[in-house]
Image: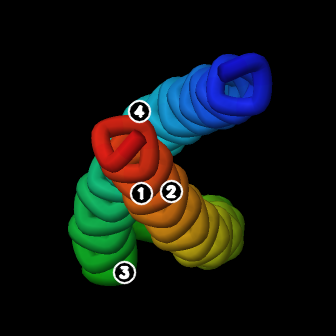
Amino acid sequence: MDKLKEKFATVRAEADAAIVRAEEAERLNTSLKDELAAKDQEAISLNNRIQLLEAQLEKAESGGSDSKTKLRELELKVEDLERKTKTLEKDNENLETKLEEATTKLREAKAELEETLRAMDDM
């Protein structure tokens, strides 16, 4: 009887630990999704800004005498924004990888929890 109670307590502790890991994985998953959405929004914003600057660049190219100066400034801004966009896209890829890993961990924790709960029910 004591061994059964001991086994039951062990299984319950394992289930509690699995629940904690699953909750942590869910929080991480949510956090990474939020961060990914923010990075996506920032990339969209930068792409819109690039389009605006390119339009201004085209207008400056057809402009008057100091258009060369404005053109160069706009080219530099476009290059800077393109670098930022590439950085954001790389960050986005990294976040997607982390999200996939967190989702996998969450699935594993849930499976472990279900297995532990089944073991408890079998007792």
Q: Quadrant of residue 68?
A: bottom right
Callout in the foreground (4, 1): 1
3D distance between C-alphas at marks 4 and 1: 24 Å
Callout in the foreground (2, 4): 2
Q: Which residue is mark 3?
A: 61
**Which comes before the other along the chain, label 4 or label 1?**
4
Q: Are marks 2 and 1 in contact (CB under 8 Å)?
A: yes
Callout in the foreground (2, 1): 1
Residue 71 lies left or right of residue 52; in this view the side is right
Q: Which residue is mark 4?
A: 30
Is residue 39 visible from the viewing direction of this image? no
Circle 4 — which element? helix
In the picture, the disc for residue 115 is 1
Which of 50 and 63 lies nearest the eye of the viewer? Answer: 50
3D distance between C-alphas at marks 3 and 4: 46 Å
Residue visible at 41% across and 33% down in the picture: 30
Residue count near mark 3 (Cα–Cα under 10 Å), binned few <14, some 14–19, many ≥20: some
Is residue 1 visible from the viewing direction of this image? yes
The kind of residue on which mark 2 rests is Glu
Q: Which residue is mark 2?
A: 112
The kind of residue on which mark 1 rests is Glu
Residue visible at 65% across and 71% down in the picture: 94
Please say if 32 is above or below 54. above
Circle 1 — which element? helix
